[in-house]
Image: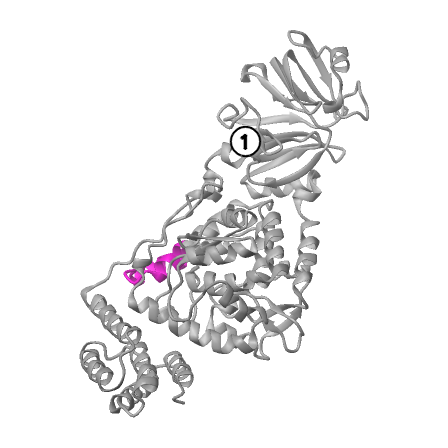
Amino acid sequence: MEIEFLPPHLRKYVVEQHYEKYTPIDQAVWRYILRQLRAFLSVNAHECYLDGLEKTGIDVERIPHIDDISKKIQEFGWRAYPVSGFIPPAAFMELQSLGVLPIASDMRTLDHLLYTPAPDIVHEAAGHAPILVHPEFAEYLRQYAQVAKKAIISKEDLDLYEAIRELSDIKENPSSTKEEIKASEEKLDRVSKSISHVSEASELGRMNWWTAEYGLIGDLKSPKLFGAGLLSSVGEAKWCLDAKVKKIPLSVDCIKMGYDITEPQPQLYVTPDFKTLGKVLEDMASQMAFRKGGLEGLNKAIQAQSVNTAELNSGIQISGKIVEAITINNQIAYLRLDGPSQLSYQDHQLEGHDNKYHAHGFGTPVGYLKDYPGRCPSSLSASEWSFVNVEPGRKTKLEFESGVVVTGTVQGRVVKDGKTLLLTLKDAKAELNGRVLFAPEWGTYDMALGCTVSSVFGGAADREAYGYTDDFVAKRVPAPKYSASELKLQSQYGALRKLREDKTTGAALEMKLAELFKTHDSEFAEDWLLRLEGVELLNTRAPQSALKAKLEKDLHALASKDEKTKQLIQDGLTLAGNL
């Protein structure tokens, strides 16, 4: 698996698939879901779905090797890498922007066969990968990722993400206790209720939910499915086409509609075609801080309480926790950042200006100098700087139109592409209307130059150099621990799978299955899926078998257990040709 082309901060999310971890029950669950999905979606999904399954090498009979999917989708300009469960939204989007489809290598349990809130290989491989073969959708996904990685993500978003991840991992782990699940649910409820505002990242998350995850396409009255959440969930795939589910024409207004990942969706959005997705995305991007900049963008970053970047019109990028934008007559006069801060240009950290050097924050005036009205300070020539005593060793006094006054002894300028990005002063003081913004005893004063804030975007400009931030935490889904009984059940499934793959037929098949189900009847009376697999196998290889009739009778008895089990069994028998 070649991951060298990935930035180092993203490599930590890539894991080995460890194909041997999939149990025979995992394989049976995959097979049941894919058989059901293929039958239903061949009629109800976008026309590229079946073609996509074939072109991405996704087989109904067995869980795919992610390496094999990656080789197939390279033909369409993508790669696939295994990851472990949820990964941070910022990391997910950056991977997609690089043409990488992150595939959660975990497999849902039999108890969560119809739906799991946790990412798993059914959702990622069978849901996302097949639609990538459509060039317009693949392009939308790339464009979306490019926009999304600029989105401002709030501290509240990160807390919510962590609570969702924790709950989904606990629910999927068979060894979790009821107390652990309840505590995690209560934590998620507390965090959800504490959300004070909808961030850009949340709005884009909603757009992703209503398009790539739960999108419908075509005619409003008879749409087809293309969202991965629908293409990987038998229950939701059928539910979504019901008249009870409201169908809304897709527009940028979808970002105003929240969603609950634990419940079927009461409304869905319909795009007439894949090209429209790009138009709606552009409508969203035009509202975002990375396009708008200015005070509006800064206020979003301040509210987020997370690491973000303000880029001045000169191109200098100031990254860190933006805490204040001081304004005079509604014009930005001074920026303040708290905690580790970084200075960059064209997404590359300026030498000597990392977040260790600027460990306690950063501040800078923004705007025009009184001596050069209408001229951005970054555009001044060496002689123009000399006129205001900005030369190494000289004392200077710089007065801004906003009223900010900076004094100190010049140490030097940082110039890139003919623009002065930074002035460094010692014994410096910065004031505005009597408020001290920088004092000599605080050390060297580095002053960024620019007259406007042209862009504000999420994260550090040079993420690799900035290092660890909360939105780039890598965690692993814990490996399940199996009891002796669970291991025995897995061996039962493994034995039936071997009979299928060995193409055992007739009396030999009936004899071996009779022995297998004798054990099953005594030890696993409540298990329905292996009995269904037995019926399927006998239906094609020993249709007159008395054992087949017994297994059908057992399944009908198990179907009376509850509505969910009844539906699963009925759907399975229908597909097997027994209903």
**Magenta span includes 171:** yes
Give the total number of marks visible in the rendering.
1
Classify residue 119 by image quadrant: bottom left
Classify residue 281 by image quadrant: bottom right
How many residues crowd around disc 1 within 10 Å: few (fewer than 14), some, or many (20 or more)? some
Q: What residue does disc 1 label?
A: 338
Q: Which residues are the magenta region?
A: 166-187
Evaluate whether residue 560 shows in this view: no
Q: Which amino acid does label 1 sit on?
A: Asp
Q: Residue at x 43, y 58 (%)?
A: 68
The secondary structure type at the circle numbered 1 is: strand
Q: Which of 86 and 245 is in front in this view?
A: 86
Classify residue 275 by image quadrant: bottom right
Instruction: Give how far across and how far down residue 394 sits, in percent.
Output: 67, 7
Evaluate whether residue 280 shows in this view: yes
Q: Nearer the viewer, residue 121 or 543?
A: 543
Instruction: Give how far across and how far down residue 89 sits, in percent.
Output: 51, 50
